[in-house]
Image: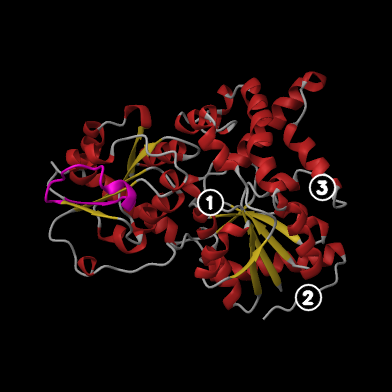
Amino acid sequence: MRVLFTVLAERSMFESMVPLAWALRTAGHDVRVAAHPELSDHVTAAGLTSVPVGRDHFLWKLVRRSKRLRDDIREDQFPPFDQGDTPVAELDPDRLQAGFDNIVPWMFRPVNEALVDDLVGFCREWRPDLVLWEPRTFAGAIAGEAVGALQGRMLWGVDYFARLRQHYLRARAERGGAAGPDALADWLTGLGARYGVGFSEDLTRGRFTVDQFPPSMATDTDVDYLRMRYVPYNGRSVVPRWLWERPERRRVCLTLGLSAMGRDYGYSVSIGDLLRSLSGLDAEIVATVPESEQSGLGELPSNVRVESFVPLHALIPTCSAVVHHGGFGSTNTPLAAGVPQLVIAQQFDSPAKARMLSEGGSGLGIPIAEATPETVRDGVRRLLDEPAFAEKSALLRDEVRALPGPNEIVKEIEALVDRNTTERGRTGYVNHV
């Protein structure tokens, strides 16, 4: 069958799709990746076929120019996701309404409309049987529906998208005629109409959803997830010689991600101060810091190693604890390795991950406003010295390992595509190997 992955030009989101893309490819299916042109080099570096569509979006240029948007990012105000981990009884319908009103025009609309015409045009020519899209690439849902393909989401985080949409719709139903416009539905209705696609909630959540988190880290939605074991992919990777042997002492990894620096809105904590504080522990500290930022770290103690890049799937299994920002790979790699982790929780779903790890006893979370060199050091000391964290992390690792891997869920995906083909009476290229 023909499978199209589609994703915004965000490297980390694309990399979350690579293991499943290769599983489908090695099962004999024709796999391509459609995205804004700037992602092409990352796609081809992964050994996959790139389909550049549309033009590059300007969202992050707008963020750099707009103080309001920069403040939104720094203060965890991505609307409506600032309420992502709020208990259902405390969700504020007015804030949800305002959140969707804001995020559709300033994020969802510009990045999708930069590629949707070409994406639909390519699908009409190539006729994919399956379109898999990351949760913000709604153009993928429209393109799939336009050609009768099965379309589904592939998550790279906690499913705030479905959770908040679900409770937003519930609040609207309770308000009845007093409910305001539904910005997401209105936009998708107009966008879909351009290609003969009628609106349904399938355009907001896909006809099925692949989730790479273990069940114990699921959020409260009515979505029936196709769960897949997380397999790390870190792009082009080289294992340095110093990482060949087991460390002589306990090792702590500090990684705050590449996206913040790559998008020029920076880190919210001082990396140099964190490293100097962590160096007081009886441990080797390994930090991944972009080369452009290393000159500003200041003088560092001898037990601190700073690298511009180390593949996390090679580094983290050698560690006794990990400090990170709650990103997709930086959370899931310690989960898969059974390593205790401390999340400096700032934005989007990192507060939820921090809470889940803390409640499950496999890690700790510190809100960004409370993250000082001292609080981070003290948290890491607990992870190193209290055996319960390692024990709970090992249990979570076993839960991850029990999930079916990418190769194992290919048959399930094939069955879903076959069912869609039968139900829609669709003809086209379907040739399972």
Residue 56: numbered disc: none
**Numbered disc 1: secondary structure:** loop
Q: Earlier in the sequence, mark 2 or mark 3?
A: 3
Residue 366 vertical position relative to residue 111 in the rendered view, above or below: above
Q: Nearer the viewer, residue 305 or 280?
A: 305
What residue did someone put label 2 on? 429
**Numbered disc 3: secondary structure:** helix
> Depth-wise, is mark 2 or mark 3 nearer the camera?
3
What residue did someone put label 3 on? 192
For marks 2 and 3, give the CA distance: 24 Å
Give x and y (percent) for residue 139: 72, 51
Q: What sort of colour scheme is used for the picture? A: secondary structure
Q: Mark 1: which amino acid?
A: Trp
Q: Nearer the viewer, residue 125 or 82?
A: 125
Residue 156: numbered disc: 1
Give x and y (percent) for residue 18: 53, 64
Q: Mark 2: which amino acid?
A: Tyr
For marks 3 and 1, give the CA distance: 25 Å
Q: Earlier in the sequence, mark 3 or mark 1?
A: 1
Q: Based on the displayed image, in which of its 4 quarters is residue 210 positioned?
A: bottom right
Residue 134 vertical position relative to residue 313 in the rendered view, above or below: above
Q: Mark 3: which amino acid?
A: Gly
Is residue 70 found inside the magenta-colored segment of the image?
no
Query: What residue do we see at 58% from left, 66% from top?
Result: 409
Q: What residue span does the magenta drawing correspond to? A: 284-303
Q: Earlier in the sequence, mark 1 or mark 2?
A: 1
**Quarter of the image where the C terminus is located:** bottom right
Q: Based on the displayed image, in which of its 4 quarters is residue 150 positioned?
A: bottom right
Using the rendered image of the protein, determine whether residue 207 is visible from the camera's viewpoint.
no
Query: What residue do we see at 23% from left, 40% from top?
Result: 272
Local crowd at mark 2 within 10 Å, few (<14), some, or many (≥20)? few
